């Protein structure tokens, strides 16, 4: 096979791959998934509260715990013991809930640490399949990060973590996970959270967004002009932007992917089909994207916040502003 023939063959293979991918994407958008929807779980409307301040945090926590307790009672009466237990856990007196909504898949914003006095605040933004029913694993990640920050923070530096399940995440096996729709709807809510945190902590506190999987798409959609110091994308399928510069943020943009993360094999393409943007474009860990790529170790897609992991160590360093200590592959 001569050089010209080899080039033509590679081009045909490339076109074939793109055609197959386009067909798969089109099918994901057009064809409905089978399976019955879960019956709606009754729950009260969220507590009506003014924008939180340092002085009203305890009041907000108590009101949201009370709402979670009522949601638990309603779920139990409906016969959903699993959701009743999840809501009842949220209502525990030790929980600091900045927001709670037990309706549907459920939403919650939980605080770890003394938010009102924190010098560094890390906000965790989850990816697909995160709901009140699966909240335990998200909370475990937030607790691990909180412990890591407390252990690594310089003396006198106070830290807090905010676990933000503030949007309806897509299912991993669903049409929505391949489009930016959920992220576009979530972005204003994330911006509102950052505004609320600024009202609680004041302007001198450094805020960092740590965004996992589809959550990185949410962070990217919210990034334009957002008052945060750093945005870290882990296990990201892409952001919908061609480059870090396309996020229009003054924050430092970081990216990492574990060696065993399946998201590496997601095609990094983007197309507008039937009124939806399908796919998320440039790989955030590629040189073309222009993020600060850091080491995440050998973990898989769900391992970035594992205690003792290299990725957790580096995420804590980013959140603490210790950027020169972050390690790279």
Image (tube, helix red, strand yellow):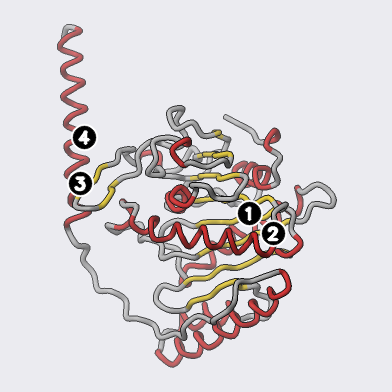
The residue identified by callout 2 is: 160
Looking at marks 1 and 3 on the same chain, the residue that comes earlier in the sequence is marked by: 3
The residues bearing labels 2 and 3 have C-alpha atoms spaced at a distance of 42 Å
Percent across and percent down for residue 229 are: 62, 45
Look at 40% across and 42% down and name the residue there.
238
The residues bearing labels 1 and 3 have C-alpha atoms spaced at a distance of 37 Å
The residue identified by callout 1 is: 122
Q: Is mark 2 in CB contact (under 8 Å) with mark 3?
A: no
Q: Is mark 4 in CB contact (under 8 Å) with mark 2?
A: no
The residues bearing labels 2 and 1 have C-alpha atoms spaced at a distance of 7 Å
Looking at marks 4 and 2 on the same chain, the residue that comes earlier in the sequence is marked by: 4
Residue 188, label in figure: none
Look at 47% across and 78% down and name the residue there.
102
The secondary structure type at the circle numbered 2 is strand
Residue 24, label in figure: 3
The secondary structure type at the circle numbered 4 is helix
Q: Nearer the viewer, mark 2 or mark 3?
A: 2
Residue 18, label in figure: 4
The residues bearing labels 4 and 2 have C-alpha atoms spaced at a distance of 45 Å
**Residue reaching furthest to the right:** 155
Looking at marks 4 and 1 on the same chain, the residue that comes earlier in the sequence is marked by: 4
Query: Residue 69, relative to residue 219: is it above or below?
Result: below
Q: How many marks?
A: 4
Quick check: 54 left or right of 128? right
Looking at marks 3 and 4 on the same chain, the residue that comes earlier in the sequence is marked by: 4
Q: Nearer the viewer, mark 1 or mark 3?
A: 1
- Out of 96 and 313, give the one closest to the viewer: 96
């Amino acid at each position: 096979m001569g050089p010209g023939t080899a080039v033509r063959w590679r081009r045909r293979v490339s076109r074939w791959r793109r055609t197959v991918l386009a067909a798969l994407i089109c099918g994901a958008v057009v064809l409905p998934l089978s399976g019955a929807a879960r019956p709606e779980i009754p729950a009260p409307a969220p507590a009506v509260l003014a924008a939180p301040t340092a002085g009203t945090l305890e009041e907000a926590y108590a009101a949201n715990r009370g709402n979670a307790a009522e949601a638990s009672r309603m779920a139990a009466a409906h016969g959903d013991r699993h959701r009743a237990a999840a809501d009842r856990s949220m209502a525990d007196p030790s929980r600091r809930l900045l927001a709670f909504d037990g309706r549907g898949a459920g939403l919650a914003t939980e605080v770890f640490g003394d938010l009102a006095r924190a010098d560094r605040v890390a906000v965790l933004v989850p990816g697909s399949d995160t709901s009140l029913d699966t909240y335990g694993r998200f909370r475990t990640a937030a607790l691990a990060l909180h412990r890591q920050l407390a252990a690594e923070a310089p003396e006198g530096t106070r830290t807090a973590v905010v676990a933000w399940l503030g949007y309806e995440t897509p299912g991993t096996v669903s049409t929505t996970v391949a489009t930016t729709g959920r992220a576009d709807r979530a972005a204003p809510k994330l911006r509102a959270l950052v505004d609320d945190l600024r009202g609680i902590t004041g302007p001198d506190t450094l805020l960092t967004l740590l965004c996992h999987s589809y959550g990185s798409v949410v962070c990217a959609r919210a990034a334009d002009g957002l008052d945060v110091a750093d945005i870290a994308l882990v296990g990201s399928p892409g952001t919908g932007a061609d480059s870090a510069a396309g996020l229009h943020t003054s924050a430092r943009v970081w990216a990492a992917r574990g060696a065993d993360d399946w998201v590496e094999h997601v095609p990094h393409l983007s197309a507008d089909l039937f009124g939806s943007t399908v796919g998320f474009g440039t790989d955030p860990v590629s040189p073309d994207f222009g993020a600060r790529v850091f080491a995440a170790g050998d973990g898989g897609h769900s391992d970035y916040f594992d205690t003792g992991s290299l990725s957790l160590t580096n995420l804590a360093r980013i959140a603490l502003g210790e950027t020169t200590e972050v390690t790279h592959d």
